[in-house]
Image: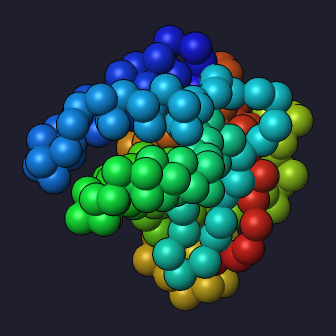
Amino acid sequence: MNRKEAEKLDQKIREYLINMSHDLKIQEDMASLIADKYLEIIPDTLEKNIVFLNKDSYSLKPGNIKLNMKCFVMAAIEFFASISNPKSLFSYIQLALLIIIFVGKIEIKKLNKECSVIVFALHQFSAYDFYVSEEQIKEKVDKICEEKEMDFVTNFTESLNQLYEMRVIKMENGRIALNESVWGEI
């Protein structure tokens, strides 16, 4: 995630917070306070994100969003203890929990079986710092599918494009490498 994407995500989360504030019938100011004081969106660093391969494979990009939930809850408790309005306190905590769920949905990208097999093949090539040709990957993917008695990858190009859009892989002149560390097996 570059700086521009981080700013767009920040705007998207702020809009979500304002909408949830209206739904929960609490002040918009609280949504802005949460976004300003307790939520931080950070552009990508050089650290690799992680792909988890298993029955439900997914790519996790945890480094971009940080929510200081502990500080938020403590500040909310102090504030509402001072005004003695416990009903509102629960609405604010509910808003914070909804933020966590919303952020979680953004940062976890599920991989279908075909994408998982491609990522596993790249991992077996150790294609982290060097590129592998599409032909080599396709052959490896077919071999893995045969060994694991899985359906063969029918939408290879489409799956590559999906992985590229998710930034799991990088592509250059028909060659592919992994952008993320891989844990687990298919």
User: Would residue 76 be visible to someone looking at this image?
Assistant: no
Colouring convention used in this rendered image of the protein? rainbow
- Residue 166 x, y percent position in the rendering: 50, 39
Q: Is residue 29 above or below residue 104?
A: above
Q: Quadrant of residue 127?
A: top right
- Residue 48 x, y percent position in the rendering: 78, 41
Quarter placement of the N terminus: top right
Residue beneath the point at 23% across and 32% down:
28
- Residue 164 x, y percent position in the rendering: 53, 35
Q: Quadrant of residue 146?
A: bottom right
Toward the bottom, the furthest residue is: 149
Comparing 174 with 109, the one in front is 109
Comparing 74 with 184, the one in front is 74
User: Would residue 52 be visible to someone looking at this image?
Assistant: yes
Comparing 111 with 25, the one in front is 25
In the image: residue 109, left or right of residue 92: right
Residue beneath the point at 43% across and 26% down:
10
Q: How many marks?
A: 0
Comparing 48 with 95, the one in front is 95
In the image: residue 128, left or right of residue 155: right
Q: Is residue 184 above or below residue 76?
A: below
Q: Quadrant of residue 13?
A: top left
- Residue 95 x, y percent position in the rendering: 32, 53
Residue beneath the point at 68% across and 41% down:
63
Residue beneath the point at 86% across and 52% down:
126
Quarter placement of the C terminus: bottom right
In the image: residue 184, left or right of residue 125: left
